[in-house]
């Protein structure tokens, strides 16, 4: 929570945030997209870019994070990622998907564009011909170390998946219960 350390690590990186008050409509845990009657463009209108060091641990704002679930073609398995490098507070954690911050380079449909960018940075996947990312809902954990983030969950079905960022991630398929 040291602002100076964050400023040194991320001196110019900007991330997309919305006022915390605007996210109060999203319950803790997972919420299906259709339950809130808001689309991605509505969220893009509510936010702005600020320096990452000013967004981190700031209770006044929520960092919007695209979070991508990769299921196998039959939908029976998810590609699970273990964090072995990168941000210290995430090391050793398992994730059911990949994702990251929305940056100014994601211009246009910024949430969808950042989801595509993050997925392609972290993973190499193959899909069936017309398969596309689908926005399926929101996730947040108000008791976690990352409670200053609100996840926008996307799903894509893949015929194969592997990790690109081998220095920070290990990936494997895991069967759904």
Image (tube, grey):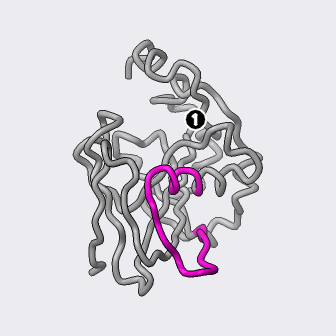
Of residue 116 and residue 97, the one placed in the foreground of this image is: 116
Dot 1 crowding, Cα within 10 Å, few <14, some 14–19, many 20+: many
User: Which residues are the magenta region?
Assistant: 116-135
Q: Which residue is mark 1?
A: 61
Quadrant housing residue 109: bottom right
Task: Report helix, strand or loop for mark 1.
Answer: strand
Of residue 177 and residue 84, the one placed in the foreground of this image is: 84
Of residue 143 and residue 10, the one placed in the foreground of this image is: 10
- The quarter of the image holding the C terminus is bottom left
Please state the horizontal and vertical placement of residue 11, each as a whole percent of the image: 53, 18
Residue shown at 65% from the left, 46% from the top: 22
Q: Is residue 129 magenta?
A: yes
Residue shown at 57% from the left, 27% from the top: 13
Query: Is residue 154 toward the left or the right of residue 85 in the image?
Result: right
Query: Is residue 48 toward the left or the right of residue 75 in the image?
Result: right
Q: Is residue 53 magenta?
A: no
Total numbered circles? 1
């Amino acid at each position: 929570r040291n602002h100076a350390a964050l400023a040194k690590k991320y001196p110019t990186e900007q991330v997309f945030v919305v006022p915390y008050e605007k996210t109060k409509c999203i319950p803790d845990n997972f919420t299906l997209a259709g339950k809130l009657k808001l689309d991605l463009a509505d969220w893009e209108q509510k936010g702005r870019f600020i320096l990452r060091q000013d967004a981190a641990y700031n209770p006044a704002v929520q960092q919007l994070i695209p979070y991508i679930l990769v299921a196998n073609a039959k939908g029976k398995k998810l590609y699970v990622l273990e964090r072995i490098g990168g941000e210290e507070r995430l090391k050793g954690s398992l994730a059911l998907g990949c994702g990251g911050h929305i940056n100014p380079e994601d211009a246009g449909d910024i949430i969808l564009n950042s989801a595509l960018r993050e997925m392609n940075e972290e993973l190499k996947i193959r899909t069936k011909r017309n398969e596309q990312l689908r926005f399926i809902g929101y996730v947040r954990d108000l008791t976690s170390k990352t409670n200053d983030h609100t996840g926008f969950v996307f799903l894509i079905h893949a015929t194969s998946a592997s990790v690109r960022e081998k220095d920070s991630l290990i990936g494997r398929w895991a069967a759904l219960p």
